[in-house]
Image (cartoon, rainbow, N blue to C red):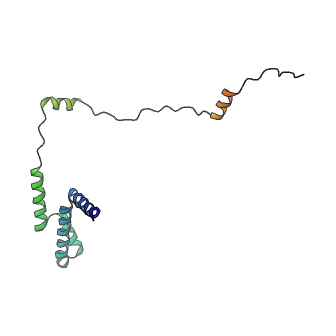
């Protein structure tokens, strides 16, 4: 039961974090607008008028008002000092590029190993009497 409660709480938190209630309310408003406009105007005109934004319903207006209030509540961005403006105007963004790779020639390891570790043979071969 505890595992289910923590999962449910995490799901609700994630839903709220990604503006789930606002999106759900907007979808519901669009569905209501389509439901009201399709019998009067037909499908094509109802879809055009619903998603064009020219004729918003009361629900859409309340959502827009809520979003405007939320943006107004956000902290304002502080003004840059003259020094910060000068530094940001003169500095260029750094290019992040991978280091240049040098292509190594293909070495056949088997030949390399044979040549390095082959014992030297006496020349001419010894005579065993």
Counting the numbered discs, the total is 0
Task: Give the percent coordinates (x, y) of residue 83.
Answer: 15, 28
* Residue at x-position 66% and y-position 32%: 111
Quarter of the image with the C terminus in it: top right
Q: Name the residue nearer the viewer: 7 or 64.
A: 7
Measured from the top left, where is residue 25 in percent x and y? 17, 66
Q: In the orientation shown, which residue stands out farthest toward the front?
A: 1
Residue 101 in the figure: left or right of residue 86 = right
Residue 46 locus on image (x, y percent): 20, 72
Q: Quadrant of residue 11?
A: bottom left
Q: Is residue 24 above or below residue 121?
A: below
- The x and y percentages for residue 118 are 70, 27
Q: Is residue 40 left or right of residue 106?
A: left
Residue 110, relative to residue 76: is it above or below? above
Report whether residue 31 is seen: yes
Outermost residue to the right: 129
Q: Residue at x 21, y 67 (%)?
A: 27
| Residue at image coords 38%, 35% | 97
- Which quadrant of the figure contains the N terminus? bottom left
Q: Nearer the viewer, residue 50 or 58?
A: 58
Q: Is residue 56 visible?
A: no
Residue 65 placement: quadrant: bottom left
């Amino acid at each position: 039961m505890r595992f289910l409660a923590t999962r449910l709480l995490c799901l609700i938190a994630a839903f709220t974090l990604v503006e789930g209630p606002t999106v759900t309310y907007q979808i519901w408003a669009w569905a209501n607008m389509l439901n009201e406009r399709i019998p009067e105007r037909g499908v094509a005109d109802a879809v055009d008028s619903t998603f064009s934004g020219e004729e918003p319903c009361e629900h859409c207006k309340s959502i827009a008002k809520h979003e405007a209030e939320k943006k107004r509540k956000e902290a304002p961005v502080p003004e840059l000092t003259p020094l910060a403006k000068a530094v940001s105007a003169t500095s260029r963004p750094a290019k992040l590029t991978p280091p240049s790779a040098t292509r190594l020639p293909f070495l056949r390891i088997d030949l390399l190993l044979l040549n390095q570790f082959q014992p030297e043979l006496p020349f001419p071969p010894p005579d065993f009497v």
